[in-house]
Amino acid sequence: MGDETGTMDETGTKPGRRKLNDLQTRLTLTHAISSRRCHPQLCTRTLGHQSTAPHMPRQARLEIPGVPLHITQRGVNRCAIFLDDEDRRHYLRLLGESAASHGLRIHAYVLMGNHVHLLVSSDGSGQVSLGMRQLGQAYVTAFNRRHGRTGTLWEGRFKSSLVDSDRYLLTAYRYIELNPVRASMVERPEHHHWSSVHANLALCEDSLVTPHACFIEMGATPQVRAQAYRAWLKQGVSDDELIAIRQHLQQERAFGSKRFQAMAEKALGRPVSVRRPGRPSRTEEKLDGI
C-alpha cells in the first residue's frame, strides 16, 4: 500500500499541501471602475507573500514643445463636472491661471456637461501636463468644497493627441467647437456660451484664446479670418474625421500626416500612429490622410 501523504491529486499537488494553501489564501472583493459602472472582480492574495506581478509604469505623455495638443477630460462614470454657471466660470478662471503659470496657449475650448475639450500648445517641455495637473487638482478641490462632496471627479488622467498643422489643426478646431451642435444642445456653435467659438468668429474678445499661426493664416484681419472660419465650420465634421480624431484621442497618438507621425515618433522614441486590429480596411487607410 502506498503512502497516502506522498500521492498527488489531479493538479499535481499533495493533499496536505493543497489544504495548507487553501488556508493561506483569502479572497477579497475589489471594484474596477470603468467609464460607465463598477465591475466586481475577484482577486486572490496569499498571506505572508508579496505579489510578484510586475508594476506597469504610466506611459509618458506625447508632448513636443510647440506642437498643439487636443485634450479631453471627462467626469468619473461620465458624471457632470459642472452643476451651474459658477462652476463653469471658475473652471475658466483656473484655466487662465494655469495657462499663465505654465506658458500655455489656449487656441480652442468647449465646456460640455460631463467633459471638456481643449486645444493647447506650449514652448516649454512638459508644461501642458503640469498645467493640466494644476487645473484638475484646483478645480476638484473647489468643486468638492462648494458642493459638499469628497473623492475624485475626473475619469483618470486626461486624454491627449498631438495635432499636425494646417488642415489637421483646423479640423481639431472645428471638432471642438462643433461639439455642442453634435450633442444637439444648440443649433449653431455660437449659441453655446461656454466656447472659444465666439472669439474665433470675432464676435467678442476672450482673454483665454490665443489664435494659432495656422488660424491667423486664414485671413489678414480678424473679420476676414472670422468669415473664412465660419465657412469652415459650416462644412461640418465628416464621419471619417470623427472616427480618426476619436481614435487618436483614445489611444493618445499623433493626429497628422505620415511625415508628421514619423517626426514625432523619432522625437519621442515611441509609436505614435493609431493601432488597428487586423488588416486595415480601405476606409481605415483613408483616415490617415484626411
Image: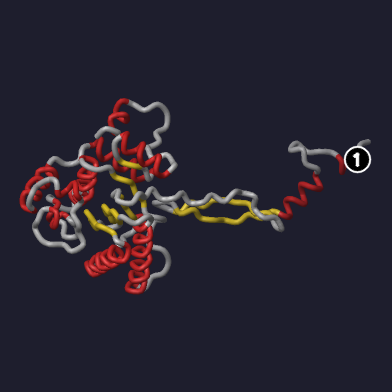
Q: Nearer the viewer, residue 177 or 148?
A: 177
Label 1 SS:
loop
7 or 51, which lies in front? 51
Question: Most extreme residue toward the right, as rendered?
Answer: 1
| Residue type, mark 1 in image | Asp
> Does 57 sit left or right of 101 as displayed?
right
Q: Position of residue 17 (x, y in %)?
A: 79, 47
**Residue 83 visible in image:** no
Question: Quarter holding the N terminus?
Answer: top right
Query: In the rendered image, which quarter contains the C terminus?
Result: top left
Quarter of the image where one finds residue 95: bottom left
- Which residue is at a point 31% across and 38% down the rendered structure image? 260
- Horizontal side of 11 relative to 64 (left or right) equals right
Q: Is residue 270 above or below residue 101?
A: above
Q: Position of residue 88 (x, y in %)?
A: 24, 65
Whether residue 127 is visible here, answered yes or no, is yes
Q: Which residue is mark 1?
A: 3
